[in-house]
Amino acid sequence: MIRYKFEDRLPRLEIGTIADADLEGSATTLHLKTGDGEESLPVIVRRNSSKITLTCHAGWGDVRQTIYLTQTPCHFGGSRAWFLCPLCDRRCGILYLTKQFGCRRCSKLRYASQYESPRERMRRRLIKIRKLIGPDLVIGHPLNPPPKGMSVKRWHELADEYAALRKLYFREGEKPCAWREDAPTARDWKQKVRTAMEQADEARRPRRRKPPSRTPRRPPASPAPGAAPQAR
Ligand SMILES: [Zn+2]
């Protein structure tokens, strides 16, 4: 059985950090962060033209690896730097530290969100919308008017989605067991939210009365000059 690790929780080294820092010749200490931006692990980096040597002391022992760098030309001039993964030799922009440094594929990584239950996903979406249009992060609180730069139409879309999702989220919360058989899938609740949003949009639209149909009256066809009058 393959055990997947979560990408957000591993120390990572991004190519931008290497490209920006002036590393040529001397050893520099960089602090690795996780995807959540939390922990940091000091790593000594030595750069030697097209390769770097990484040395760090991780919990399971010392890691010392040489990573080759490569460049590809950009469309509008200049070039972009990449790591060559030490395990599979493919280009990558981020190296993750598991037992050793490797690309996302070699490290067998998954996003933490891929393991969330539908209810957790709903909650994450609710919090995300609140950050955009709410005064704070409390899910039950009222919303703020559109922030600067957001169109009224977009605000209404988000507010409708929020209202529909909040209703579903609280209804889910009333059912004690998250792993019951009829628990909704992500597709279920997304469809329900979409339907509720369409209904809200329909209700908001101003109802226009149909203008009374006016068919222009045609003037009675005048008989052609010289034609005999029709008998009735
Ligand atoms: Zn790899």
Image (tube, grey):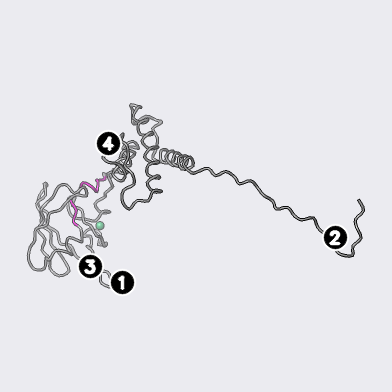
Whether residue 56 sits left or right of residue 204 in the image: it is left
Quote the CA–CA distance across marks 4 and 3.
Answer: 47 Å
User: In percent of the image, x 31 and y 71: which residue is there?
Assistant: 76
Q: Which residue is mark 2?
A: 223
Quote the CA–CA distance across marks 2 and 4.
Answer: 80 Å
What is the crowding at mark 2: few (fewer than 14 residues within 10 Å), some, or many (at least 20)?
A: few
Task: For marks 3 and 1, give the one nearer the viewer.
Answer: 1
Element marked by disc 4: loop
Residue type pointed to by label 2: Pro
Q: Residue furthest left?
A: 26
Q: Which residue is mark 1?
A: 76
The span shown in magenta is: 4-13
- CB within 8 Å, label 2 to label 1: no
What is the crowding at mark 1: few (fewer than 14 residues within 10 Å), some, or many (at least 20)?
A: few
Q: Which residue is mark 4?
A: 138
The numbered mark, 4 or 3, whose residue comes first in the sequence reads 3
Q: Position of residue 74 (x, y in %)?
A: 29, 69
Element marked by disc 1: loop
Residue type pointed to by label 3: Thr
Task: For marks 2 and 3, give the one nearer the viewer.
Answer: 2
Quote the CA–CA distance across marks 2 and 3.
Answer: 90 Å
User: In percent of the image, x 20 and y 58: which residue is there?
Assistant: 14
Q: Which residue is mark 3?
A: 70
Is 215 inside the magenta-drawn segment? no
The numbered mark, 3 or 1, whose residue comes first in the sequence reads 3
Quote the CA–CA distance across marks 2 and 1.
Answer: 76 Å
Residue type pointed to by label 1: Phe
Element marked by disc 2: loop
What is the crowding at mark 4: few (fewer than 14 residues within 10 Å), some, or many (at least 20)?
A: few
